[in-house]
Image (tube, rainbow, N blue to C red):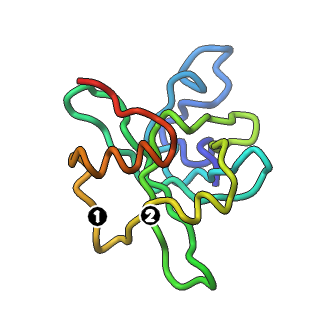
Amino acid sequence: MSYEERDDYGMYKNKHGKGPGPELMGANTLIGDHVHNLQNEHLGVIKEFMVDMRTGAIAYAVMSSSRFLGLGEKLFAVPWQVLTLDPQHKRFTMDIPKERIASAPGFDTDHWPDMADTRWMGEVHAYFGTSPAVV
């Protein structure tokens, strides 16, 4: 299901160039979007956005990926900077090989990390080659 299909308020219907998207998007309409890499391999699905309440910026997108042989779901906090909206295909893209996302630091739904912990943030940002936002 794409963001246009999750658009409860009609934000993205053709309004003669008026209205949001793709420069401004409703968060609820993006939850459930698929994430692919530049090789068009499916990496996961957006499950949640984590907003830095000090800055108002999105810090991470929480992405799910099915584990090997379908044994549950692994969640990843993906730094917002590594995601690009692909409005043509109605999904997000990341420039990362599929094998690398499989070994990214992750967690399960019952054991969320303390995402405000600077050590945890450093590990995630180092893995994805980004820097945390400075407050």
Label 1: how many residues lie within 10 Å, few (<14), some (14-19) or many (20+)?
few
75 or 103, which is in the foreground? 103
Contact between marks 1 and 2 (CB within 8 A): the answer is yes
Q: Where 72 sits versus 135, above or below?
A: below
Label at residue 38: none
Q: Earlier in the sequence, mark 1 or mark 2?
A: 2
Q: Residue at x 47, y 70 (%)?
A: 74
Amino acid identity at mark 2: Leu
Residue at horizontal 56 percent and vertical 57 percent from the top: 45
Mark identifier at residue 75: 2
Q: Which amino acid does label 1 sit on?
A: Trp
Q: In which quadrant is the N terminus drawn? A: bottom right
- Give the residue at x 53% y 85%: 71
120 with respect to 2 (left or right): left
35 vs 112: above or below? above
Instruction: From the image, tell me which residue sits under label 1.
Output: 112
